[in-house]
Amino acid sequence: MQNKKEFDNRNAVNDMKKLMFYAICMMVVMISCKQKGQTASADSKDSVTAVVDSIIEENDTTPMPMFLMGEDGRYMQMLYWVWVEEPQKTDDNAEWFDEIHLSWAQQDMFRRNKAQYTNMLMDDKMVKIKYVDEVLKDPDGNTPSVGERHRKEIPSLCARFDFVDPKEKKTNEYGNIEYGTVIVTDSYLKTRKMQSIVFDKSEWDKPKPLPEAAIKQLEQKYGMKVDRMRLVATIGGRYIWGLLQFKGEYKNAPKDGFYKDSKVALALDVLIDGDKVYAHEELGMYDDEYGPGWNADDGGEYVGCYPMAVFEGPKGLEICYGRDAPESSAVGMFYLRGGQLIQITYETYHNMIDEQIPVWKKDFAEMLRLYQENDPHAHKDVHLTKWAHCYIDYENEWIWLRDKDDKNGAFFVRKDGKLTLIDVENAHQKPSACEKDGVKYLKFSGTAGGPSWQQIIYAFKDGKQLWKLFALEVYGELSECMLNGKEISKDVGKTYLEKVPEGKEITAYFNDIEKKQE
């Protein structure tokens, strides 16, 4: 009798088969529709089924390549694209449940094998890595997002990896880890031969063309003229990888699904082996006035897939590919099997741009503690209820807390995880900011009672505080000055004050602390 582990593994393999078979069969149907205006033949479907079965059977003992798509400052990340809990069928998801569950099964196969991924391709060589852990919750106890590439300060649902040899771990000038994208298992490397990839270095506006014979073959096949092409890379000194897009509307495109009521543009990712040409079709939108488009802000130019690693396997060529567009990044595999170039996309990740650095519950607790300790008597009845990032300078992370009436507040800087209270605002100290000669200033100004007026000024350059000045005026005349907590003469004080321009209102968009802490 089968044990439970073997039974579960077989079920997962069967789910994966269904997923890949469904995705690839849909692609074959579409290809046939585009070429002949009819559905794929039974022979075509049977050939694809055989190819998928071959890939899956091998993947059961030899996991396919996977990808690292992010890093958090400490570790590299295998980003997940669906939740880790197995989805359950409901009335709301019934129509799409099979696709949802099969996507989960694909990811779950990689999750179960995650510790086997001990090799990372970096600078044309394999570097040893190790599985560390999974990120399943953020610091607030919530489940992180999936299918998105965030800035490193924002947690993602993922498996994390590290270098086996700490000496191989390097960071760039921005503090980001330098790492490779493609990761593979030992069993995969033992049965494959890695191929060289030489990328063409032509200027982007003067691309190297694809072989003329291949272009003629594709133009004849699709009945369209090539509008743009590019030789991307040479693989193993034998294959050519390139991209092209056709001019005008693709009139043999399928009239169903997303493109049912739309005009369609056609582009190809192309693999050339001598006189043999293999192509994968990519449909886009076509407009008579604005022309073609495949991604937001692509300017009418198909960005195409590019090989990140290529292996010659027991049953044919296997290409790890990436595809980067302004709003997304896709990764997956191309398999050259049975005269077909078969694409399996793992995920198209949404590239999150201009995200705020997160502020967690523990951070708010620490800032509120620092605020109360600053003046326990004056602050005991003050409740700071909202927060915002503001930019006194762009080298530091500034966090501004305020009460609901904008009468009291506090400015903090967070660096290397440590929060520092810079100063507070109240009825007698209202904040403003300014800049001159590369120095950024945070000012607090207000009445000190009667004819007195006080200013507290902080100067910052290159992310570091240069000095702090306290100046008290009585009837408009400088009466008292202190620099960095030490008394200075009025003449020296005037010299510092003259450096500082008039302050301007600080722009910030506030969020509710309580909602964050729910």
Image (spheres, helix red, strand yellow):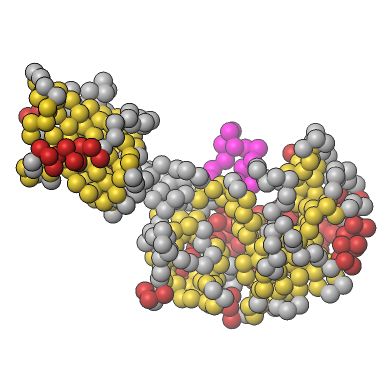
> With 202 as the anchor, is 375 left or right in this view?
left
Residue 349 lies, in percent from the top left, at: 57, 50
Q: Is residue 146 above or below residue 182?
A: above
Q: Is residue 328 visible to the viewer in this orientation of the structure?
A: yes
Residue 341 lies, in percent from the top left, at: 76, 63
Q: Is residue 7 above or below residue 83?
A: below
Residue at the limit of the structure toward the top, as seen here: 450
Report the span colored magenta: 86-101
> With 479 as the anchor, is 32 left or right in this view?
right
Q: Residue at x 43, y 64 (%)?
A: 172
Q: Residue at x 87, y 62 (%)?
A: 215
> With 1 as the anchor, is 247 left or right in this view?
right
Residue 50 lies, in percent from the top left, at: 76, 65
- Residue in front for this viewpoint, 320 or 304: 304
Q: Quadrant of residue 517?
A: top left
Q: Is residue 370 visible to the viewer in this orientation of the structure?
A: no
Q: Is residue 378 magenta?
A: no
Q: Quadrant of residue 299?
A: top right
Q: Is residue 96 magenta?
A: yes
> With 88 as the anchor, is 225 left or right in this view?
right
Q: Residue at x 59, y 33 (%)?
A: 91
